[in-house]
Image: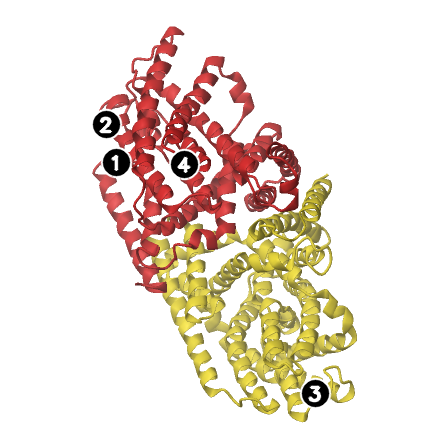
Amino acid sequence: MLKGPLALVVLVALALAGAEIRRRLRARGVGAPALESFLFVGIGIGLGSLGLGMFPDTVVLTLRPVVLLGVTWIGLVVGLQLDFRVLGRLQAWHRWVGLGVPAAAGAVVAAGSLLAGHPPHEVVLLAAVAMLASPRVVLLLARTAAPSDRAAMRLLKLVMALSSIPAVVLFGAATGLAGAGGGSLTQALGGGERLLLMVGLAVVLGYATIVLLAGERTLVHILAVLIGVTALSAGAALLLGGEPMLMAMIAGAVVMNRCRFPHRILRAAHGLEMPMLVALLVLLGAWWRAEAFPWTVLLLLVVVRGAALLALGWATASMARRRGVAVHRSDLGAGLLPQGPLTLAILIASVAHGQTAPAIGEAVFAAMLANHLLGWLWTRRVLFKKAGATGGEEP
Amino acid sequence: MRWFFFLCVVAVVWVLRLLLGTAGVDADASALLALGLLMVGGELSGDVGERLRVPRVTAYLVLGMLLGPSLAGLITSGDLGALRLFEEMALGIIALTAGGEFTVRALARRWRLILAVTFSHAAGILIMAGGTLWLLLGAVPVLGELSPGARLAASALFGVIAVAKSPATTIAIITETRARGDLVDVVLGVTILKDLMILLLFTWVDGLARGWVGGTGVDAAGALHLAAAVLASLGVGLLLGVVLGLYLTHVGLHREITVLAVVLVSMELAHGAGLEHLLICMAAGFAARNFFSRASESFVHALERSSPPIYVIFFALVGAGLDLGVFASGWAVVAVLVAVRLVLIWGFTGGVVAVLKGPAATRRYAWMGFVAQAGFSLGLAARIAREFPSFGGRLATLIVGAVVVNQLLGPILWRHALVASGEAEEVSK
């Protein structure tokens, strides 16, 4: 097995070759299906025990503080995007569609996994994963081609933007209610009380962030405080036996909705999101053990989720038409099939909590990859005019 | 208002720690809580430091001391162990910055001065600081009853530690003040060279000392092995720097992640192959900066972007790790040893620069850049305590006490030197 600098040389050579291939493909007008997230997992597999052997498969648990910090950061970014003023301006049926479609897809998969006999923590993970949809594919396609149905596109974007809320809340609340870590306090308090305490602490941290960053314009100082708040959220949530992602999301939402100028904080948080994600995805890849995974998970997350989303897309289109919105396509659920970085973050959070067996994690990952590719092919076919057509929508 | 909210956060952490106790608590959670407290508090204390015209790194150190196990206890010894990963990552980035700050042009222009100051410190301070402790031990038995060999061994080991300095502090203050000039070039050059030398010097003196105490004698094989490790670290570092430079020149995506990846690989190599993390990163930074002119700007920019949070983590953890109880117990002897070291650094540095007709500012102020001592000296002290059970524990106690004072004094003096010499861009603006 390759070790140390030689492995890095190989990795950098691969990156150089990859960058060159991508540049040539782009020059010829060949687009890629927004697979960067999966590519980083692939690099992790290459560096892990199945490949070059630089990272052992226990690396996620060895580097648990880093993993938890990364996952919590993603929760913070999700929270920083929850602008209740924007949500309040939406029409009521838009809100129902935005939150209801992912929640219904999650419920269908949860019911399926219960019937298949999965334990509760796996049911929660599968439901949260089923709820999430990545907008990357749609946004990438919109750069080169015009959508064939603009009203359907707008509805799709709405659902994608809101899908993270029920997913993170479900995952966080379920982890919090089931949490056993933390010591005497967590044993003394019930799940609901601990959740309440976590929400209270998250609100305090959110307000502390606002005050600490008042008037601060330097990016690195904003980042330093945000890293501190994220670490505090992660530490406090874990000590209380809760989910760090949820706590950071609440703190982030407080910042977004109570701060006078939250957008520079959001920009700073976004700046570090990619490095955090890359690190997490590489670690997730290194964790890969190539175990035989249960096909029921793949079936639930690809077939059952896909069918549920198509049915919900059809129902949403019908509802829109009844309200006088000219949606021509009924299969807009296809646009919700692709899955991306946030789904992977929830998977790695579950791994870091020691709740997910490698076989389940690998099945979830395989399902996400399948959903992503299927979603890319289908969305390109049904929701976009021929590539290269003018009038492409700006992402 | 900002302090009120920070105190609220401190109170929350305190209450959580109090209610949860220590038994069965998730160690990673506790470490993350400590990290959060240091990061948030570091930003506030840095601002206070600026208002008091004290370097930000000193403010981070003081914060670490206040929150650490010696005083408030909000950061436990267990947290310090768990956060070692972050500390090593920070040290790697600081070392990359050190290498990146150093250009071949500066080295070529001042090589005679850099070599002369380094060797005068290595020989002069080692002998005279060691000699001072040897005389002191004759008058005050602070290390208990010692055989002549053990007395000589303790003095020589102390001499080596007196030569050592904290490269991280030097770099942090240069970055903070954005200083450029002759003084910076000379102090940086000596810092890097001293770092190479101190490892070899310590191994050599350590071997001699064991022979004097009556142990295993001079460990020639160990010294050779270390010399090989130093050379290998430099070679690997240069190779990593070339890879980094190639990547930054031809790909250039995710620069901060790439820099972090290089640091992680260096850490892995240091642990796995027995190489020196600090030297690998320094050499990598030097190669990336000097061999790739197109990449050097983006490299420096990537380092500058990531440096402030890194400094908070590193110096606050160093502060939290300092054992203040040690200083309280033997402050008089510590004060003498610190004063003697200061005089020796001043004398040798100023003298050598004057003899070689170096710039006036360098002659007057360069010594202030060599005062600070931190993690490296503490690591050597811990090794002495382990290897010399008869006197090592008490000697390490004295060394830790001196490091506390030097680390508080060093950044203030070095910042003053950069400001007074006119090389500090930020402050003069």
**Residue denoted by label 1:** A31
**What is the C-alpha distance between the residues marked 4 and 3?**
65 Å
Chain B representation colour: yellow
Q: Amino acid at mark 1?
A: Gly
Q: Is residue B425 at all visible to an observer of this figure?
A: no
Q: Secondary structure at mark 2?
A: loop
Residue position marked by numbered label 3 in the rendering: B134
Identify the amino acid type marked 4: Thr
Would you name the residue on which mark 4 appears? A343
Q: Are marks 1 and 3 in contact (CB under 8 Å)?
A: no
Q: Chain of mark 2?
A: A
Q: Are marks 4 and 3 on the same chain?
A: no
C-alpha separation, residue under disc 1 versus residue under disc 3: 74 Å
Q: In the image, what residue occupies the spot 36% across and 49% down?
A: A285
Q: Which chain is red?
A: A
Are dots 1 and 2 in contact, CB under 8 Å?
yes
Q: Do the dots labelled 1 and 2 sit on one chain?
A: yes
Disc 2 marks a residue whose amino acid type is Ala
Left or right: residue B124 versus residue A79 is right
Residue A151, position in %: x, y? 36, 16
